[in-house]
Amino acid sequence: DREHCYKQRFYGIPCHRCLQMTPSLSRCTQSCVFCWRATPENIGVQWEQARFPEAEAEDPDAIVEGCIAAHRKAISGFGGNPNVQKTMLEEAWNPIHAAISLEGEPTLYPRLGDLVEAFYGHGFKSVFIVTNGLDPEALADLGAEPTQLYVSACAPDEETYRRTCRPLVPDGWGRLMESLELLRSFSCPTVLRHTLVPDLNMRDPAGYARLAKVSNATYLEPKAAMSVGYARNRFGYHEMAWHDDIRMFAEELADESGYDILDEQPVSSIVLLSRLPEPRKLY
């Protein structure tokens, strides 16, 4: 009866056994309005956000082992909480799902396919990659596919894309379109994530439907952007979409795309659409 995140509700992933990480901390080829990470403009410190020096690329196995150690350290304090179920904490101690995204663009890390294999090699049952889609070459050369691949497609047209995602590399929109076309070549389920802010990019469902047609994505996930972290400097809590708003937008997107609404998770302000009759449970 406990509430859980959309990954568990939609895909069956036990969210208490989810490890979230990035191999490219604080580096990204976009500076999205709704992103919660710190950027140079926020903290007055300059660094090359859009480039990952190859010499800094750590060994994939070392990254996985370090992530597991950090995950265990982060949850260790729950052992002293009498309200925590001991069996759940024991299970959480050994994560089995990895979400590669969080705080940095994963495709900047030059050994991303090897990292996916390293997670599988350490006993993980599923691995998600979430990318902004600005490096189609990295996706084409991935090698090992993730269990599910997300591309953040957060604008229905190029002008909205530039205002919302604020690309730091040339031809961001063109590169995103190339990645969307590439999704058809993947055998794993693919997802278009639409992170939405009213009066910014939560408009033109027909435009988002065109992206679905280009990509033939397995799922569409319209979701409300959250005013948390450094995103609070760019849009406030009162400017967020409520779940009812997301549901209404999803209904319009369903009408335009031909995808069906399969489920929703109000606590995450997200709706799941698919061209499948039901979502593919991973556990």
Image: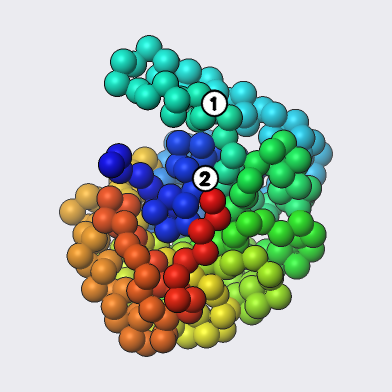
| Image marks 1 and 2: residues in contact by CB distance under 8 Å | no
The CA distance from mark 1 to mark 2 is 20 Å
Q: Which residue: 47% across, 85% down? A: 210
- Mark 2 lies on a secondary structure that is loop
Q: Which residue: 39% across, 54% down? A: 9
Residue 249 falls in image quadrant: bottom left
Q: Is residue 115 above or below residue 257?
A: above
Residue underneath mark 1 = 93
Residue 46 visible? The answer is: no
Apparent side of residue 33 relative to residue 72 in the rendered image (left or right) = left
Residue 247 is situated, as x and y percent measured from the top left of the image, at: 26, 69
Please state which of residues 258 and 87 is positioned toward the viewer in this rendering.
Answer: 87
- Mark 1 lies on a secondary structure that is loop
Residue 77 is situated, as x and y percent measured from the top left of the image, at: 42, 16
Apparent side of residue 173 relative to residue 269 in the rendered image (left or right) = right
Which amino acid type corresponds to the residue marked 1 in the rendered image? Trp
Residue 140 is situated, as x and y percent measured from the top left of the image, at: 75, 67
Is disc 1 surrounded by few (<14), some (14 to 19) or many (20+) residues within 10 Å? some
Which image quadrant: the N terminus?
A: top left
Is disc 2 surrounded by few (<14), some (14 to 19) or many (20+) residues within 10 Å? some
Which amino acid type corresponds to the residue marked 2 in the rendered image? Leu
Residue underneath mark 2 = 102
Please state which of residues 245 and 105 is positioned toward the viewer in this rendering.
Answer: 245
